[in-house]
Image: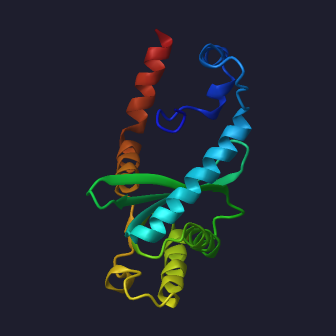
Amino acid sequence: MIIIDELAFSFVEGVGFKEFVHQLYPRFEVPCRRTIARDVLHETKESLRIKFINDRQRFSLTTDCWTSIQNINYMIVTAHFIDRSWKLHKRILTFFVVLNYKGETIGKLIENCLLDWGIERVGTITVDNASTNDTAIIYVKNKLKNWKLDDTMILGGSYLHVRCSTHIVNLIVQEGLKEFNPSIERIRNAVKYF
């Protein structure tokens, strides 16, 4: 229920859910959210990992890095793939704290993610336009070439690096808004005044 309906793990600690489970089977002890999270993560990850290895799909990855309000750097890696029924899937592979935004650090984290999940065939990696990502992609490309598999990358990785189009559009809009900034500021002040 939690995975299919994409509910928060804390859902199991709600009064309504506990009452519902009690009505179904009074002797059942509802586990805490940490137990649910641990069990779901382990079981889901292992079944997906085995599926990835057996089906030998080609994956496109997306990564994003950001800094929290607490000044902690985070990175997420998401895999996109098409199954044998031609259905598009998206799975978050990993979410972790990043020590720094250096290209080699990011590249190593992507490499570790690929090794951890048993992913060997990569089509593209989509990243934002940060210059450190250029270094990260070069690092990953070199590592994938060293794996010496015939079909690890398409065309030897010539098109492995994809720049995020929404990030590019956002940069264009931000640059365009700079020209109208004084007018926008006057309108905001007028609204605040009234």
Nearer-the-camera pick, 156 or 116: 116
Image check: 76 left or right of 126? right
Residue 40, percent across and down?
61, 45
Q: At 72% from the left edge and 32% from the top edge, which residue is drawn?
A: 31
Q: Please identify the quarter of the rendering in which residue 56 is found.
A: bottom left
Image check: 101 left or right of 121? right
Nearer-the-camera pick, 41 or 157: 41
Residue 145, percent across and down?
47, 88
Residue 51, percent across and down?
46, 63
Q: At 60% from the left edge and 51% from the top edge, which residue is drawn?
A: 43
Q: Please identify the quarter of the rendering in which residue 150 is found.
A: bottom left
For residue 89, above or below residue 20: below
Nearer-the-camera pick, 63 or 6: 6
Q: At 49% from the left edge and 71% from the top edge, which residue is drawn?
A: 119
Q: Is residue 3 in sight in this rendering? A: yes
For residue 82, above or below residue 123: above
Direction top: furthest residue: 194
Image check: 59 left or right of 112? left
Nearer-the-camera pick, 161 or 21: 21
